[in-house]
Image: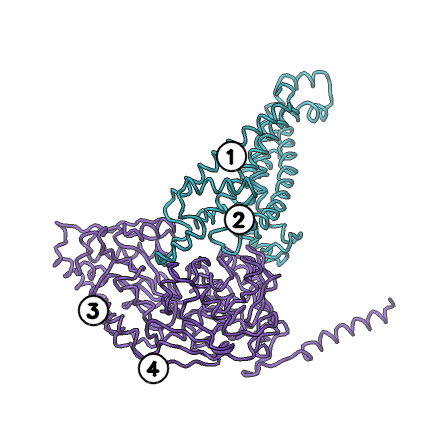
Chain colours: A purple, B cyan
Amino acid sequence: MSYFAKSLAASFVVASIAAAPVLAQEMHPVTGETLADEQTFTYSLMDDPTSLDPQIIEDVSGSAFARDLFEGLMNQDADGNLIPGVATGFTTNDDKTVYTFTLRDNAMWSDGRQVTAHDFVYAWRRAADPETGSPYSWFMDIMSIAGVGDVLSGDASPDTLGVRAIDDLTFEVTLTASLPYFASMTTHATTFPTPSWVIEEFGIEWMRPENFVGNGAYVLTEYIPGETSTRERSTSYWNNEATIIDKVVTLNIADENTAHTRYLAGELDLGTVPTGQYLRLKAEYPDETKSYPRLCTYYYSLNMGENGPESLKDVRVRQALSFAVDRSIITENILQAGQIPAFTFTPGATAGFEVPEVAFGMMSQDERNAKAKELLADAGYGADNPLELELLYNTSEGHKNIATAIVQMWKETLGINVTLANMEWKTFLQTKGDGNYDIGRAGWCGDYNEASTFLDLVSTNSGYNDSKYSNAEVDALLQSAKTMDDASANYTRIEEIVATDMPLIPVYHYTGVGMFKPSLKGWPFNNVEGNWYSRDLYKIVP
Amino acid sequence: MLNYVIKRVGLAIPTMLILIVFSFLLMHSAPGGPFTSERPLPPQVLANIEAKYGLNQPLWRQIINYIWGILTEFDLGPSFRYKDRTVNDIIEQGFPITIKYGGWAFIFAVGIGVPLGIIAAVRQNTWIDYFAVGFSIGAAVLPNFVMAPLLVIVFTLWLGWLPGGGWNGGDFQHMVMPVIALSTSYMASIARITRSSMLEVLNSNFIRTARAKGLPEHVVILRHALKPAMLPMISYLGPAFVGIITGSFIIDLYFGTGGIGIHFVNAALNRDYSVIMGLTVLVGSLTIAFNLIVDLIYAWIDPKIRY
C-alpha cells in the first residue's frame, strides 16, 4: 500500500471511530442521560446458584436469575412497590381469601407460546408437589393456599391445590386464611410460571441454555457451572422495548478480595466490598462505594428450651444480657458500614412497620448497663454465684469479632464469663437446631416485605424459633394480624412484649454494601428486599 | 509381569469397596446433612426431599444402592446441592478443565523441577545450587493461596495483561496464572527431591568407578546417575500426578476456572454426599491406577526389581 493509500485508510478509520458514538448515541427515555454503546452488565457470583429452576431455587443469587428469566404475576419497582407483571391486576373477595388475577394477553414464552393461567396452575402445583422435592415448597405453605398441607404430606394429589385457571387469562387462588399481603408474595421466584411442555421433555436438564424456555425479559444463552453464565434480552418479552441492558454476564469468583481486585481492573460493573474495608473504600471511591438498608436482622437467640441452661429461663438474666450489649460499638467500631443498632427484631425498613419505642431502646447505654447490673443481682448472680454461659457461632472472622466484643461487654458490665465456641456451618446448624446451646448467633432476612416474616419466628410453633420461646399473647396477636388490613398495632405490641421477655438479643439490622461502576445506573437501592431486575438497569457514558 | 498386573487389579476392587463404605460412613457421621439449613425445613418438606433422594432408607441400603448404581450404569447419583445437575454432569464438565490446567502444571513442574534439581546437585555449592535451593524454599513458603491473589493483582490489575479469572475453553491467556500458581510448589518439591537423591547417587561407588574409568561427566550423569536418582522422584510423582490433575480448591476458588477442585472442599462443607462420594471414587481409582503404573515404571528403571 502506498503512503497515500495508508494515510487515507488511516484517516477513514479515525473518522469512523469518531463518528461511531455520534451515530449510536441514545438517550435514556426518562432521565435523558446518554446511554453507553455497550449495554452489558457483568457481576460476580460466590458460587453457582443451587438451581435455576424457579420452583426449586432457594438462594439469593438464583432468585436474581429467576427475576430476569421469568416473570411472575406481580413485580416490584425500584422502591419495592408492587407493580403489574404478567398480571395486569387482581381483585379479591371481601375477606381476602380468594384472589383473582387478570393476565395480560401479550405475555409470551421465549418459544412463542402465550403465557396463560394454566402455566401458573402448573407451576404452583409443581412447587407443592412432593415429587418435585423443592426446598422452598414451604413457601406455598406460608402463602396459605387451600389444600397445601395435604399436598405436601402426600395425602392429596397436587391437583387439589386451591389454584385454578378460570380461562386462559384469569388465574384464581383460594386461601385458607385472609392474607392482605398475598399479592406481594407473588414476586417470589417459587411462584413464577414454568413451561410444562419443556420440563416434561427434558427433565432436570430443562434449564440448560439449549433447552431453555422462559417468559422473562432475558433468555439464558450460556451457562458454564463454576465459571460463567450469559443471559440475553428476549425479543418475545412483552415489554422488551423498555429493556436497555442487552446482556447480563455472571463470573464465578468465590473469593471476595479477588472479586474486588477484578472490579478495580474493570472486569465487573458490580463489585464486592471485602469484610472490614467499607470505610477505606468509601474514602477512596466515594461515588462507587454504597451502603443501603436490607431487610435483615443479626441477633443472638437465648435458649429457653429444655436443653438450655436454667439461668436463661429467668427473664431478668435475659434482659441483663441484652441491656449490656452496647450495639453502637458493634455498628460503629466493628462493622462500620452504616448498620443500624437493633432494639427490635423487625427492621425499621420493613413496609408498614414503624419501629416502636421499646423502653430499653430509649435509655442511654449507661442507664442500660446500670439496669443490667441490677437485674442480674436480683436474679441472684454475682461474685459468689457467678453466671457461666457459652456463646455458639459459626466459624467466621466477622462473627468472631462481634462475639468477642459482646463477651467482653458482658464481662466488664456484668462480670459474667461467657466462653466462645465456634463450629463449622452444618455442625453449628445441627447443634443449634437440636437445642444444644446457651446463646446462639443467628441472622434472619425477610422473605417478603411485611413484619410477619420476622415476627413469626417468636411464635410458639415456628420451626425457626430456636429460643423455644412461647407466649400465648404473642401467638394470639400474630394470629389476628393475619386477617387485618393494617396490623401495625399488633406488630408494635409484639415487639414490646419481645423487648420485655427478651427471648433473643437483637444486635443490628443489616445493610447491603457494594461497589457500583459510575456507568451503571438504575440500581434499586431503596428496594429493601434487594430484588433487582436487570431490565431496570442501564449503562451511561460516564 | 502380566500375573502381577492382574493380581493388582484384582486387589483394587476390594480396596475401592472398602474406600466407598468407609467414606460413606464417615460422611454420614458428620453432624448436619445436605438439607440442614439456616431456615430448617418443615418436617414434611424435609421428608419429601429425603424421599426423593433416597436418604430415608437405612444406611446399608443406601450404600448398596450407590455401589449398584456405579457398577450397573456408572451412575454417581444426583448432586444434593446443585439440584439441576448430577454428579456425572459435574465431573464431566469440571474434570477436563482440571486435567488441562493440571496437566500443563505437571509438565511445567517436572520440566523445570527435574533439570533444576540435577544441575543443583551436579554444581553443588555454586550459585545455581543456591538459587535452586532458595527457589524451593521460597516456593514452599509462598503457598498458592497467597500466590494466586498476588498474580491477579500484578497481571490483571497493575499490568492489565491477563484476565483475572475464568476459563474461556482453556485458552492460553486464561491458563497462564492457574498453571503458574499450581505448578510452583510441585516444582519446588520436585527440584528438592531430585537434588538430594542425585547427590546421594553421585557419591556412590559405581559413579566413582564410572569416573575412574574416565567417562566424560555428561555420560556419567545422564547414563549412570540419572536413572537410579529418579526412583524417589517416580514414587513422588505418581500420587502427585493424581493430585495435580484432579485440580486444586485454591485454583478454582481464585480463578473461577470451573474445575472440580473446588468441590473437594465445598461438597464436604455442604454435605453434598453424592458429590463427595463421586470425587472419592474418582480420586481413589486414579490413585490406585497410578500407583500401579509407578510400580511398573520402577521395574523398568531398576533391574533389581522383579515382579
Q: Which residue is mark 4?
A: A94
Q: Is residue A284 visible to us here?
A: no
Residue A329 in the image: state x and y as whole percent. Answer: 31, 63
Q: Secondary structure at mark 1?
A: helix
The mark found on residue B224 in the picture is none
Residue A434 in the image: state x and y as whole percent. Answer: 30, 51
Residue type, numbered disc 2: Val
Residue B97 position (above or below residue B13): below
Could you tell me how far apart the alpha carbons at marks 2 and 1 are, in whole angstroms?
18 Å
Chain letter of mark 3 equals A
Front-most of A197 and B39?
A197
Could you tell me how far apart the alpha carbons at marks 4 and 3 are, in whole angstroms?
27 Å
Location of the C terminus of chain B (image quadrant) = top right
Asked if residue A205 lies left or right of residue A403, the reply is: right
Q: Secondary structure at mark 3?
A: helix
Q: Which residue is mark 3?
A: A473
Chain letter of mark 4 equals A
Could you tell me how far apart the alpha carbons at marks 3 and 2 are, in whole angstroms?
49 Å
Front-most of A141 and B166?
A141
Residue type, numbered disc 1: Met
Q: Which residue is mark 2?
A: B87
Q: Specify whether disc 1 shares its chain with disc 3.
A: no
Front-most of A70 and A454?
A70
Q: Mark 1 or mark 2, which is nearer the start of the sequence?
A: 1
Front-most of B206 and A313?
A313
Q: Mark 3 or mark 4, which is nearer the start of the sequence?
A: 4
Could you tell me how far apart the alpha carbons at marks 1 and 3 are, in whole angstroms?
59 Å
- Which residue is drawn at the image coordinates 78% and 74% (left, top)? A12
Task: Evaluate if marks 2 and 1 touch, with contact meaning CB atoms under 8 Å apart.
Answer: no
Q: Which residue is mark 1?
A: B16
Task: Evaluate if marks 4 and 3 touch, with contact meaning CB atoms under 8 Å apart.
Answer: no
